[in-house]
Image (cartoon, grey):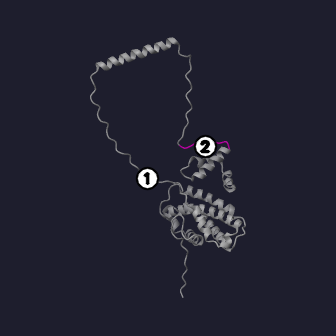
Amino acid sequence: MSDTATDFYLQKTNAELLFFAEHPELYQASLVEAARRELRRRGITPAMPGVTYAPPAAPAAGPPIGLLTLLAAVVLLVALGAFYYVKQKDQPAPAAAAAAPRKDPPQLTEVATSAIPSYDVASAVAQQLRQLPAVERGNAKALKQFRELAKRFWTAETQTEYLTKQAHDGKAGPLFADQALVVRETWRAWNHAAVYSYEFGPEMQAQFKNMGKAASSQQHVLESLPDLLPEQKFLTDKELTAREAEVQDWLATLLPTSPVTGQPYRATVLKIRM
């Protein structure tokens, strides 16, 4: 785990970490497991959902069974067996048992999930790196730094695109605000790394700048969007729609198509009348 991710969990309260650990259906598995590790480090064992533990039954108190008690039990069992045999012999043979009613096969129903899917971030990063000039890819130190920045960016960006698409498709669920908060925390890994200065070539520097602009706007969108979900007010909010259009412009300079939708990013085209 990176130092940045470790800082993220160290800054969380016990209650926040327990919420992650006890609601694994809401978050990525890596987030839940990291929260549980931090709780165990603090000496707290989170309850596993759906699992209960029953203490072993205490042994029965009292003296051991003696020889007389054992013999009495044997006699009683023999007497009960003889009584059952005689009773069954005197009774008429039972009628053929009615066939058990046939049960219909279980009905399968679809249940909406609140988990945020994972996307192929590695492929997005590799595609972005291939667009860099060969001379800039030859700088090993800068390339390593840029690759890590791109990884953090696309991890948060794909999650953001998933949530905003859910909103635009009218599929935002009751946990949308919580999901948005989780994704905003994912952006923190980018924010921590973006404050440093890097010796990038011209193309790397231009892409780094556009990633920063997109990251800033996307975090603002995630902060504002939950309050604008009723009646899809976000569709008519001028600031939000302007930010979403700007994000499309900046993303189009990084990748031609979205890793989430597979659709091209829409660069704004200005037409000038002569």
Total tally of numbered discs in the picture? 2
Residue drawn at point x = 56 percent, y = 56 percent: 179
Q: Is residue 45 magenta?
A: yes
Q: Magenta part of the protein: which range?
A: 42-49
- Look at label 2 and name its amino acid: Pro
For the view shown, which residue lies furthest in the top direction?
68
**Mark 1 residue type:** Glu
Query: What type of secondary structure mainly makes up the magenta span?
Result: loop
Question: To which residue does mark 1 refer?
Answer: 110
Asked whether residue 16 appears in the rendered view, the answer is no
At horizontal 68% and vertical 61% (from top left) the residue drawn is 192
Q: Secondary structure at mark 2?
A: loop
Nearest the viewer among 178 and 23 is 23
Q: Return the residue nearer the eye: 184 or 227.
A: 184
**Label drawn at residue 46:** 2
Label 2 Cα crowd, 10 Å radius (few <14 / some 14-19 / many 20+): some
Q: Nearer the viewer, residue 154 or 218?
A: 154
Residue 198, quarter of the rendered image:
bottom right
- The image quarter containing residue 265 is bottom right
How far from the left and from the top, in percent, is residue 154?
60, 63
Q: CA distance from mark 1 to mark 2?
A: 29 Å
* Residue 118 appears in the rendering: yes
Which numbered disc, 1 or 2, marks the residue that appears first in the sequence? 2
Question: Looking at the picture, does residue 63 appear above or below residue 137?
Answer: above
Q: Position of residue 40 (x, y in %)?
A: 65, 44
Q: Is residue 37 magenta?
A: no
- 226 vs 247, nearest the viewer: 247
Residue 130, placed above or below residue 39 = below
Circle 1 — which element? loop
